[in-house]
Amino acid sequence: MRALASMIGDGRGFDIRASAPPPALVVSRAASALAVAARAGDNRGPRSSHRDPRPVSDPHATPEDGGSPALVLAYSNLGHVFTHLFTILYATAVLHLPGVFGLPYGELLGLASVGLVLYGVAALPAGWLGDRWSQVGMMVVFFVGTGAGSIVTGLASGTAGLFAGLTLIGLFASIYHPVGIAWLVASVRRQGMTLGFNGVFGSVGSAVGPVFVGAMIDWVSWRAAFIVPGVLAIGAGALLAYAWWRGLVRDARADRVPAPPAGRGAMARVFVILTFTMTCGGFIYSGLTNTMPKLFETGLGPELAGSYTQIGLYVGAITGAASLSSLLGGWLADRYSPRQVYLAFWLLSVLPVYLMTTTRDGALLGATMLAMFFHTAYGASENLLVARYTPFRWRALAYGAKFVLALGVGGLAVHLAGKLFDHAGSFDLMYLSFAGFGVLAFASALLLPRPAPRLLTAGASA
């Protein structure tokens, strides 16, 4: 009865124990409440000023929350699989390509550098378009564009074709992180855990990619490793476009769980600090993922790594196991300060990267596993920090700026890795620089503002 009285009251906690208002007033208030609920589409609040013109087919979807949360989760997670899959395929395929094109490993690896730079740099305009045009529309472009770029790579007859295809992959893959993550964060309640779960899917793409490429090279063709996932991505884009047309998914216009606004000073401080730490993280992570296949080929020896499939299995197993740290990082970020979680995993990441320069065989596998585990774990807390210190209307643009830094330096890391390996025959100098950047990133993150006490919503459902 108290809930019913509150519903038909004026929003200030109508008390059933108070004297009853005149019947006409009750009827008037109830009619007004029902009219507002009907306009909103799901009886939860007033209509957004940004009305979505597409029809509402899902009774649980609203223009405010981006559509059905289940479908948002599905397409966002699938997009994360594809973006990491496509950007890691070439790192394993290039082990085989010197024998195909008659060029050294470092030169062929360098063909991916422009695409990897665009993977980061183009995230900024992609985020702006997601904010100003459509999140869902940009996701459709992402699926179709990356699929087309992968097919172009698989059909390449020379280095020009490889360069064109890899560049297209990087350009369209840049859409996912600023747009897909902003769409996801706005559509769920348990943001930390959901981001951790989403991170697992990204790592699945990184884990499956090397295994898939190795198997295709050993049993079918290196070209199939690009053409098959390209066709699948275009199909996923077509299905998303259909769901968008039917109104099953739509653009998010506000956070499902609004956070208290941060002050301008805190936002500026966080922006400067994260600019540096995210640049360090992008340089390290990109360097690790793109050099891991070659590291294992040279550091494990023919007894442990006698085929491309075996190398792919090692890379895939380590990347897949490390993905579990996304769940841990997300779980911790929901229950504790994202700042504390961010600091802890940055500190833990330094030693394993250093050990990668001093170990071989099984110990090398263990050190690489720990390095990837800790560098994957802080992703959810980092994304939460960006979300909490950015106004909603600039959210996708903010994620775009983040990934310009985090992914744009990936092309530089790959370019330097190829040059260093051709010159020195190892990645030791690069990995030592990674450890140094990790120390600097931890020291910078200590300057992040301490959070104000807040009520945790660990029991809220996604």
Image (cartoon, rainbow, N blue to C red):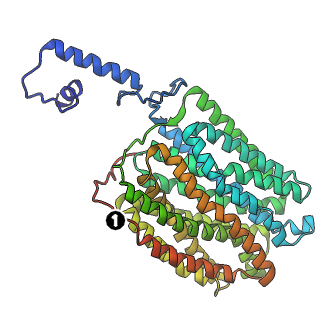
Q: Where is residue 272 in the image (x, y as percent from the top left)?
A: 48, 64
In the drawing, does residue 363 fall left or right of residue 327? right
Task: Answer whether residue 108 is visible to the viewer in this image.
Answer: yes
What crowding class fits label 1: few (fewer than 14 Cα within 10 Å), some (14-19), or many (20 or more)? few
For residue 192, above or below residue 95 = above
Question: Mark 1 highlights which residue?
Answer: 450
User: Where residue 417 appears, x then y in whole percent?
Assistant: 73, 74
Residue drawn where x is 62% and y is 52% of the image: 123
Residue 22 in the image: state x and y as whole percent.
12, 15
Q: Is residue 429 above or below residue 289?
A: below
Q: Which of 221 and 42 is in front in this view?
A: 42
Residue found at x 32% / y 51%: 457
The image quarter in which residue 233 lies: top right
Q: Residue at x 65, y 56 (%)?
A: 121
Relative to 369, is 243 above or below?
above
Which quadrant of the structure image shows residue 301? Answer: bottom right
Position of the C terminus by quadrant: top left
Which residue is drawn at the image coordinates 49% and 28% (left, top)? Answer: 58
Q: Is residue 458 found left or right of 367 in the rendered image?
A: left
View extreme (top): residue: 24
Three-letter amino acid code at disc 1? Arg
Quadrant in the picture for the N terminus: top left
